[in-house]
Structures are given as structure tokens and as C-alpha cells.
Image (cartoon, helix red, strand yellow):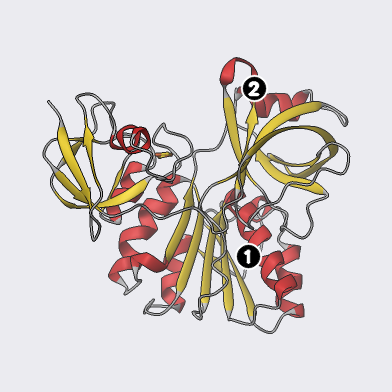
Amino acid sequence: MSYCVRIDNTELEFTVNAEESILDAALREGLAFPFNCRSGTCGTCAAKVIEGEVAYPEGRTSALPAAEALGKALLCQAQPLTDLVIEFPRRPPEPFIEPRQLPCRVARIEDLCHDVRRLYLRTPGVERLELFAGQYIDILLQGGRRRSFSLANPPHDNELLELHIRRIPEGEFTSYVFDEIEPETLLRFEGPLGNFYLRENSPNPILMMGGSTGFAPLKGMLEHAFHAGIERPIHLYWGARTRGDLYLDELPQRWAQEHENFQYTPVLSEPEADVDWPGKTGWVHSALLDDYPDLDDFDVYMSGPPAMIEAALDEFIAHGLDPEHLYYDSFEYAA
Ligand code: FES
């Protein structure tokens, strides 16, 4: 059984064969649909299904709830149940930076808090990785396995690549990072990857929301925005469990002193009983909505674990956010 998929507002059509994903069929036809993981976790391939129905025979993957909240399907996982009309998926940044596989050495290791380490990676010789602020790289492990980490450095500061790595109990790679890795260790990565990057040409004020190490890509975007002289108002909300988990809190505090157009609100979900915390508590997206109940005309960038993204998506849209102005990076912590 095969089905016809038409791309809305175009004459483009292609056929999806039995047991084939929509993405696989589109790529077979030479259509430049964006993708990264092809396993349902990154959300890059999400696109609106305007007519028809799809199924997910491999099950529900971590990026699916967020995609569905925006009325989208994950084309790398979805198979048609009927003929379809779909929108062309959101394209990667223009001009596109072709991902490359490169070796790198660990240049520096810093403990940022009890379970987050910062790794600085040096690419070989004078080789520099071009990137858009907010993109990520995959560390390539033996056996074809990968671990994805956001780049926390902005594009203009790419002599060293900066990763914020959270320790995951019994995580193969993160245990290695916390227990064994040393300066000059040789790694290999592919990048830059992903559609999560700062839309510089929008006129809208910007709200950013990060959960835990979801701060990393937002840091890269903010440092880029300051460097590029972007004057649109920007308000960052950074959610963490405890005060100690806000592992670079002094950095956005300093930015707020230095840049008139920037505000910072940290939010703790479980502040320590013995710590005097005068700031906001609870869910980070609720704190944002307390301050901005009407999200019309904002660009919203959010980065964090799927539970945070899912909790925020429906509510933000219910509060007037245009889904086309919503950009998110939903990640399971790489183990
Ligand atoms: Fe489909 Fe990553 S390419 S979710």
C-alpha cells in the first residue's frame, strides 16, 4: 500500500511506500526536508499535516508531544494512513552551514556545580567551526553512537567550543566526562546541527526560557545578541531545582547590569530550606506567564527537558503566542 503526499501551496507530490517514513520518501525524491536525529528526538523534521492522518508504528518518541502541541507530525517517524497534504517543514538556517565531522581535543575542564561540567574543545590547527548561535554538536562514540550537546559559545568566539554537560547516573559518556576525561583527550564530533538559532531579523521582543543546562544554547544566543548590537528587549527566565543548580547565575546577573535591553529572572522549583531565596519559585513557564500574560508579538525561545517544553507549549499558545514565533530545543539529557 502506498500513499500520495502533496506539499501545500506547491505542485510537489511524492509517494510514500508501505513501512516507509514520510521523511525517507521525501529524501528519496530529492526534496531538501530538514532532519537531524532521524529517531524522533530532535524535532527538526516536524511539519504540519493539513489533510490526512499519520501513524507512529515505532511508538511515541520524546519530541512527539511538543510537535503535536504545535499541530505538527514528526516526519522521520510518521507513516501515512491516508493520502496527505503537508506543509514544507521549517528549513534549517539560511545560509545553511554544512555539518562536518571533525576531531577535537579537550582544552579545559571546569566544574560548574555538583553535577554540571563545562568542557572546552579545541578543533585542530586553525580550523574553526562556523555555527549559528544556539546550534548543537553530536559527540561521536564508538559503534556509531552519538551524544548531543548544545554549543554555549557564540559564533564570534569559536576558538574553543563550549559544552555544559550534566552528569547522568550511569550515563556512559557523562560518567566518562566526570570520572575519566582529561585535558588533551581526543574526541570526534559532527556539527553544527539543529534549527534552534536566533532569528536576528525579527522586530519582536524576545523571551527566553531555559531549564537546567538548557541555559547553554541561550547563553550562546545572548552573547551573540550583545555582540551584534541587537537592541530588542530580551528577558531570560532560567529554571532550576535549587540555587546551587543555577550554575552560572552571576553571568546573566552581570549582563542585566551591562545591557539596558536585557532582564534576567531565575526561578527555583525546590529552593533549599536553609537558603534565603528572595526570587521566584515554582514552574519556570508559570513565572514567565505571571509577568507576560499576553504573548502576542513576542518571539519565544525555550530550551530544556521535554517535560518543561511540553508544560509550556500549550499554555504559551493559549496566551496568544504565534506558534511560528516559537522556537524550542527539547532534549533528553545525553547520557
Ligand atoms: Fe525527526 Fe529528529 S529528524 S525528530
Judged from the image, the secondary structure of the residue bearing numbered disc 1 is loop
Nearest to viewer (mark 1 / mark 2): 2
Residue located at (75% from left, 79% from top)? 257
Q: Position of residue 164 (x, y in %)?
A: 69, 45
Q: Does any atom of ligand 1 lie closer than 8 Å to the CB of label 1?
A: no
Residue located at (44% from left, 76% from top)? 298
Residue found at the very far front of the displayed protein:
11
Residue 273 visible? The answer is no
Label drawn at residue 300: none
Q: Quadrant of residue 43?
A: top left
Q: Which residue is mark 2?
A: 141
Q: Residues within 10 Å of mark 2 (few under 14, many from 20)?
A: few
Q: Which residue is mark 1?
A: 277
Mark 2 residue type: Leu
Q: Could you tell me how far apart the alpha carbons at marks 1 and 2 are, in whole angstroms?
A: 41 Å
Q: Position of residue 220 (x, y in %)?
A: 67, 58
Q: Is residue 200 above or below residue 125?
A: below
Residue 308 visible? The answer is yes
Mark 1 residue type: Trp
In contact (CB < 8 Å): disc 1 and disc 2 = no
In primary-sequence order, the first of circles 1 and 2 is 2
Q: Nearer the viewer, residue 38 or 217?
A: 38
The quadrant the C terminus occupies is: top right
Lateral position of residue 166 relative to residue 258, left or right: left
Q: So how many labels did they put on this image? A: 2
Q: Residues within 10 Å of mark 1 (few under 14, many from 20)?
A: some
Lateral position of residue 80 relative to residue 324, left or right: left
Give ligand 1's quarter of the image.
Answer: top left
Q: Nearer the viewer, residue 64 or 178?
A: 64
